[in-house]
Amino acid sequence: AGIAFLVEYLDDTIKTPEDVDRLLALPLIGYIAEMQPNGKSDAEVYVSRQPRSPVSEAFRSLRTNLEFAAVDKPLRTILVTGAEAADGKTTVAANLAAIFAQGGKRVLLLDCDLRRPRVHRFLGIQNRVGLTDLFRDSLGLEAVTHQWADSSSKPMFVITSGSLPPNPAELLGSKKMDHLLAEMAGRVDVDVLDSPPSLVSDSQLLAAKVDGVLLVV
């Protein structure tokens, strides 16, 4: 009994919605169950493969809660980040963008993780050019934008990370990034940004440039 009590006492992981409210003092706006891979890959857009599953319904509920979260000023740019690596931020970002597209929105999914990008793997698209190429003024938005869609949604626009730079924090915190985000927001209804974990400064720099931050725990 003493060992069981000690193990429970030393366990600082978050397991319930009540833990989120008690430890973080942040509103819980979505609860996504664990998703099972299809056997081919552990990375995929689940709401496209299983549109009628409870997980897809949970993402629809998350979409609705985000729309209610800012009635006076709609969330046009949403940053998705996590406390640490492997928390599921890219999974949430990709599926959230897809569920917005299924709802009839024009959506852009932007991979701002310039350290370990994964959006292109989730969607099965090339990452030859992307966000980092826009900083060199060699390509325009159209040249680095992909279209991805399933049978149940409007096309979703995707910009991958591009080649990994030696100074990701400087790029993401620059004035050029402000101009790029403003240009992207003017072309779509919702812009979903996938970022590195909040342990690094990248996500903190991006948080100051968006309308809302979605923290995945």
Image (cartoon, rainbow, N blue to C red):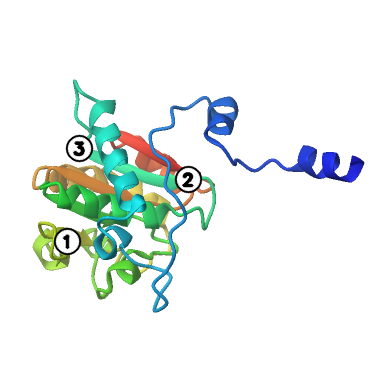
Residue 66's quadrant in the figure? Answer: top left
Residue 137 tag number: 1
Q: Can residue 211 be spotted in the picture? A: no
Residue 125's quadrant in the figure? Answer: bottom left
Q: Measured from the top left, where is residue 121 in percent x and y?
A: 34, 71
Q: Quadrant of the N terminus?
A: top right
* Front tag of 2 and 1: 2
Residue 81 tag number: none
Identify whether 45 is placed above or below 209. below
How far apart are the alpha carbons under marks 2 and 1?
25 Å
Q: Earlier in the sequence, mark 2 or mark 1?
A: 1
Residue 76 tag number: 3
Identify whether 125 is placed above or below 216. below
Q: Is residue 81 left or right of residue 94?
A: right
User: Looking at the image, which residue is at 43% across and 41% down?
Assistant: 31
The three-letter amino acid code for the residue at tag 1 is Asp
User: Looking at the image, which residue is at 25% across and 27% down?
Assistant: 68
Residue under label 2: 201
Judge by depth and name the residue closer to the eye, 26 or 59.
59
